[in-house]
Image (cartoon, rainbow, N blue to C red):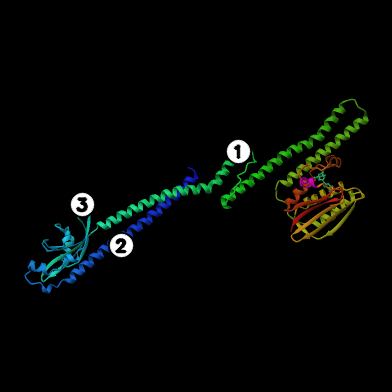
Amino acid sequence: MPIRWRLTIWFALILCGILLVSGTVLYILLQSYLDAQVDNNLRIYAARIHGTLNPVEIPQPLDYEVIHSRLPPINEFASPGIYIQLTEKSGNVVVKSNNLGNQELPVDFVLVSEGLSGKTAIGTVAAGGGSRVRILISPLYLGEKVLLLEVAQSFNHVDATMAQMRLALLISILVALALSTVFGNAMVRGVLSPVNKILQTVKNIETSSDLGRRVGYFGPKDEIGELAVTFDHMIEHLDKAFRSQRYFVADASHELRGPLTVIRGNLDLLKRNISEADKMEALQAMGRESIRMSKIIDDLLFLAEVESGEPLKCQDVSLKGILAEEAERAKNIAGRRKIILKKQQDVFVKGDAQRLRQLLANLVDNAIKYTPEDGTIVLSLFRDRDWVQLDVTDTGIGIASEHLPHLFDRFYRVDKARSRASGGTGLGLAIVKGIAEQHGGKITVTSKPGEGSSFTAWFKV
Ligand code: ADP
């Protein structure tokens, strides 16, 4: 059963339960209130009748004519629904109110015997035709004779009220059930609609293998809204990851195919009858290309390791020490280019020294590669509030702005021929970015063609 219907049925059942309990309590309270009102009425009527009687004036022996003339004017007390009757011990009715007509009040022997024993008794007696009367019996002493005063009230109006109450409760419960089902269902459907959209999107992605589909949720930012937005983000990440993996495989194959083609071509050449000098050249070319291939594979393996998300070796690394080492190394390979160490603050970051050294080495190697012999490369390290900035600035060829957003992509090269000629694999900056991110940092670049570039690695401290 769909969750929408399960929730709706639960809502309706809970509401029904609450209405039943509160309706029953209300019903019982009303019933006892009306019963008590009837009893009170009867007691008040009986008390009034007793109050009007002066038994001293009644002569002995009892003469019914006299008694009738002296008895309380019961018809004055009787009112529609209130019946009064005086009976003898034997059960003979002495006098009764006119509204009884030719009927008498029903006899209940328990009540009668209690009344005769001098007590006031009250009880409900069936009056035929399904109706009930409440009767209050009290002894009325006339000299030595005891009469029973019976004051009765029909329960008809109470029963009619209670029947109406039952009907009203039943109707209100049914209406509440119907309304809660209709509105509850509509409400749950509205609340769950993003879930249905997510489900539909998942099904579409599953059948079409198209990770470009999104839920596209617009609405309140509640838990379900957050689920829909998070789902879209997750699919976005997956889409990016799959796409970059696809490009990566294509790029890697493409990059490896170049050296392989050269090696195969030279192998074919060697099979032929060629001069010793040509053989030598072919062998050298094959050697160069195999070195290139192993560099690409080494870089790829290193990049995969950096991006694998494996936990880092976490040591306190002195960036100043690394910078000094790297400056020394750079001076040995920079030729006539000037290497300047500027602003060296003694800062430590948590991370892997080996990888941080690799990050700096890649930036410095690039700076040397893309800066003419008379250029300058400035290395600096400083702290700005929570961030440490490790900066490599050169006065080299610079990079046009349209290349900057792709610079850190794998195998991206501004000038392919130049990069290849200088032994570049196009993976250096992707490795730099991977290492920086692995240390919770980032890498930024500013550059102007013909003026130089500045690469900055940022780390949090
Ligand atoms: P490569 O192995 O080709 O150097 P990288 O990933 O290290 O690959 O760099 C990507 C591209 O960015 C390079 O091909 C080059 O065009 C450009 N580049 C990197 N560093 C610099 C720099 N300091 N000056 C100018 N261009 C640079």
Label count reads 3
Instruction: Give the quarter the ligand 1 occupies.
Output: top right
Would you say the magenta stretch is mainly helix, strand or loop? helix
Q: Position of residue 315 (x, y in %)?
A: 75, 55
Between the C-alphas of marks 2 and 3, the distance is 25 Å
Among the two numbered marks 1 and 3 on one chain, the one whose residue lies closer to the N terminus: 3
Which is more toward the observer, 37 or 392? 37
- Determine the image quadrant of residue 70: bottom left
Q: What x and y, as percent, mark residue 25?
A: 35, 58
Which residue does the numbered mark 1 point to in the structure image? 206
Circle 3 is placed at which residue position? 129
Determine whether 396 is above or below 125 in the image. above
* Residue stretch in magenta: 401-408
Decide which of tag 2 and tag 3 comes sooner along the chain: 2
* Numbered circle sitting on residue 33: 2
Q: Quadrant of residue 108?
A: bottom left
Q: What residue type is labelled 1?
A: Glu
| Amino acid carrying mark 2 in the image | Tyr
Residue 273 sits inside the magenta stretch: no
Name the secondary structure under disc 1: helix
What x and y, as percent, mark residue 183? Answer: 46, 49
Q: Is mark 3 on a helix, strand or loop?
A: loop
Left or right for 322, reference 127: right
Q: Residues within 10 Å of mark 1 (few under 14, many from 20)?
A: few
In the drawing, does residue 320 fall left or right of residue 238? right
As measured in the structure, the alpha-carbon distance from the residue carrying label 1 to the one carrying label 3 is: 73 Å
> What SS does tag 2 mark?
helix
